[in-house]
Image: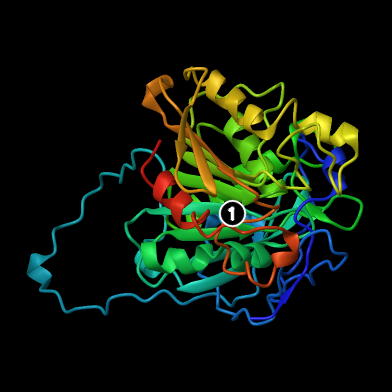
Amino acid sequence: MRTARILLVASALLITACSSGGDDTSTPEEPTQEATSPVTDGDAAAPSTESIEEIEEPPSTDAADAVTTDATDATVATEPAQDVDDEAVPATTDEPLVIDGPAEVRPSCASLTRGVTELTLDAGGAVHDVRIYVPETISSDPAPTVLDWHGLGSTGAEQAAFSGYETLAETEGFIAVHPTGVDNGTGSNSWELAQFDTPDRDDLAFADALIDLLVADFCSDPARIYSTGMSNGGLFTSELVCNRSTRIAAAASVAGTTHAPTCEPERAVPYIAFHGTADDVVPFDGDEPSTLLPPEGVDALIDDTTPGEFAEFAAGAGCEAEPTRVEETAEVIRYDYTGCDDDVPMSFYEIVGGGHTWPSSPLSDALADFGFFTQDIDATADAWAFMSQFSL
């Protein structure tokens, strides 16, 4: 698979934020089967998606008022009529049919089109491309679902290749979803953060609409929606832990963790994070410079250190102040927080010498310019093993 360099994080983080947003009444654009060309200015990288196979989308349901797809309407198969003995048919009465409440209809997992479906979703003040992967065999109905958010300047398709979540989904039987952010005004796709509020978009509202769509049209289990992401996507996962704790069953951030001053989760969320000590984009130590962010941007995201940002989540969850240090390998040190509310586990993984990278990424060899990729831990498989234990 060809790869190309893209931005995983950009200084535009300074202007993205968790705004209140407003209703957008614009008509969604038709989706494209070609992923946005990756950025090649050398700040970050991700794979090209020219080889991604087009696969027809599943039929729409009522939620499609907010969705535009390029697939034709699917034909729903019905059982053939059978001869019935007239004497076996009960006599009709004049009593009216009474329906107690509205019907709830969603497709079964077995009815979904396998493979990749690409669509657009108009929500939160913007039209987003969304890539949804349905494995050949789904583990349960309704199905566990992973939202994997890309880094700044990237796309959902590129993040899918970078993390390998679709490959793992085929093995583990969950649905993998890769949405694409919108231009933040500098030409880079982004996700909002509370520290940099803007009034013209609301990515939390988009996340709500996306989850609603997945539950209504793609048999996703509302109790088993998980969030992960790289860099800006990891930071946005932090945002969801803060503000959508009743919708996200568990979470994992990679190369980006931030605890906004306004962060007040309604419940303790099982949460892990991975971060390299030599990350030069989102610094491990807040006193270190960033190759992309000005000092005030780093200060807004990181009070002290990235592990300190994670510790604030643990403190908010009632965990013991001092974590237990576990040296898994010479390259991976895990800090486990205990005594948390509802016995929720929380762990921070320090990648010794790690760059602005995704541990064990399928593209690690091609993206060596972005720092050291440890192979001692897998930010996809290990995060899934952690998150999949939990449900709301």
**Residue 288 visible in image:** yes
Q: Residue at x 55, y 19 (%)?
A: 315
Counting from the top left corner in percent of width and height, residue 28 is at 75, 60
Three-letter amino acid code at the position of disc 1: Asp
Q: Is residue 264 above or below residue 281?
A: above
Q: Quadrant of residue 50?
A: bottom right
Counting from the top left corner in percent of width and height, residue 142 is at 36, 53
- Residue under label 1: 148
Counting from the top left corner in percent of width and height, residue 233 is at 67, 48
Q: Residue at x 54, y 55 (%)?
A: 62
Q: Quadrant of residue 4?
A: bottom right
Q: Residue at x 51, y 41 (%)?
A: 333
Foreground: 39 or 33?
39
Q: Is residue 47 above or below residue 261?
A: below
SS at mark 1 in the image: strand
Counting from the top left corner in percent of width and height, residue 390 is at 38, 40
Q: Is residue 331 above or below residue 115?
A: above
